[in-house]
Image: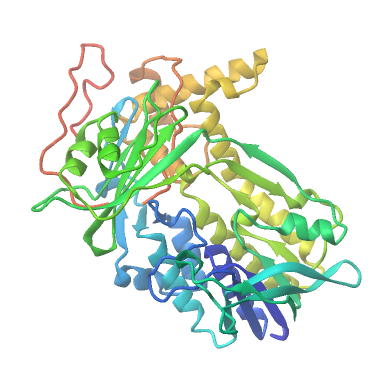
Amino acid sequence: MDGEGHAVVIGSGTAGLTAARVLARYMNRVTVIERDRTPRGTERRRGIPQARHTHSLMPAAEAGLERLFPGIGRDLTTAGAVRVRMARDMLVHGPAGWHAPSASPATFLSAGRDLIDSVIRTRLLANANVRFLHGHDVVALEPGRNDTVTGVWARARVTADGRSGAVRRDRGTGGTWGAPELLPAEFVVDASGSASPAPRWLRELGYAPPQESVVAAHASYASTLLAPPVGHIASWKSLLLLGAPGSPLQAQLNPVEGGRWSLTLRCGEGMPLPTDHLSLIAATAALSHPLLHDVTAAAEPLGPVYTCTATENRWRHYERLRHWPDQFLVLGDALATLDPAHGQGITLAVQGALTLDHLLDSHGTTTGLSYRLRRAIAHQLSPTWRTSTQNLKLARPHTSTTSAAGGLRGRLARRSAARVEAAATTSEHAATLLLEQWQALAPRGPLGPRALWAARVRAPVTDAPLPSASAGPSDGTRRSTARPPRPALGRNSPLRNAPSRP
């Protein structure tokens, strides 16, 4: 491309920041429009409702960010992000017990969402052709000839003294919206998040709204920051305790910047959601193993408990629309949201930006690219969506179809999952497979010969419903010198020969 033209990106979350970085390579001007105040440094931005919950940068997301911002992994660790080796630094307790040591070489970066966004934003602003419009709200798209979008209508928030720009709505500083003004553009990206008004904008221009797929997660989250107990020494950095049949409660404890812990508790349907520190720590006593409760009960709370109940999976199927304006694209949570349990929001945002980069590079222009972009991004999203919804159906078998065939498939899937879970307590290969599937490092597929043998020979046959095979919204600190007590094992227990986990 010739590097001429103006692109507008709506929203400054991960999807918006990474899309702006891609467009800065192909356009001579990129404007990022943000409704809220964009903070300096690692302050919290109001427009990210899940920022207070445990986050991590999974391998696919980090690799993608490195392609867009070379050296950003180093920048993140310098800013305080903690690198966690999944096989050595994270202990996983599943329905059948502690998982065997894994051979997976994968690592992830654990940090607060505000730190991650701050580092990406700083790197983006190093591009001279990128600017931010803070405190501006996009109210409509500007249509062009031959089914195109040629800009957006945006209004600025105006304070009582007549100044325009960002206003801290969270502190009640007041202000009203000014009159909308046209911002012409050759390409527009909507990355405004799950509350995206894109369906309304399209309807106003005469286009049909998209069909939506919605799968309820039937879960809620409670999160807080903790200071590790004084003198705490451990051989682990992160703890992941998955639910067990009949008890869908699960939790993740991760290290974050500043030597702190981020704790997130995932409560299943009908379970009370803790809203303060005492009730949150009390709730961890009901987890499948006492280790996490023991270490967090001695930790010092560093702030309030934040909750989240908006956990549904929602996909707006823009790729199915036959009539669509060219030079307009929807990315990130504005396109699809997943239950935070899977920790894939940042990964999908980065992958969407990389798809945009690839197609812009091969196509050579932003004109006539819309159909290919929508189809390619939907194709990329589909496996993650399928895994997320399949996990929910395994966790809640009554949500599956009640037909005979569907019921049989569901029972077989749950029996297979139960076998693999039990095998993971003794088989390195089964443990590695599950670890990679939970973190979306490998597609859900058949077991390898050694993991399959372990599942067939050592695992019990049970048809009990399993909890969702995933961690809470992802993101830990050192390995406790005390080893978790091993359960009493019967002669035929599949855990009898399991190696002790610290």
Furthest toward the left, the residue is: 231
Q: Left or right: 202 with respect to 32? A: right
Q: Left or right: 324 with respect to 373? A: right
Considering only vertical position in the picture, is 377 above or below 395? below
Q: Left or right: 350 with respect to 105? A: right
Is residue 99 something one can see in this rendering?
Answer: no
In the foreground, 458 or 388: 388
- Look at the image and tell me in which quarter the C terminus lies: top left
- Look at the image and tell me in which quarter the N terminus lies: bottom right
Residue 63 percent location from the top left of the image: 46, 63
Q: How many marks?
A: 0
Residue 15 percent location from the top left of the image: 57, 63
Residue 314 percent location from the top left of the image: 63, 44
Residue in the picture at 25% in, 40% down: 278
Considering only vertical position in the picture, is 111 above or below 244? below
Residue 482 percent location from the top left of the image: 10, 39
Q: Left or right: 72 with respect to 404? A: left
Judging from the image, the colouring scheme is rainbow
Considering only vertical position in the picture, is 150 above or below 240? below
In the foreground, 37 or 95: 37
Is residue 5 something one can see in this rendering?
Answer: yes
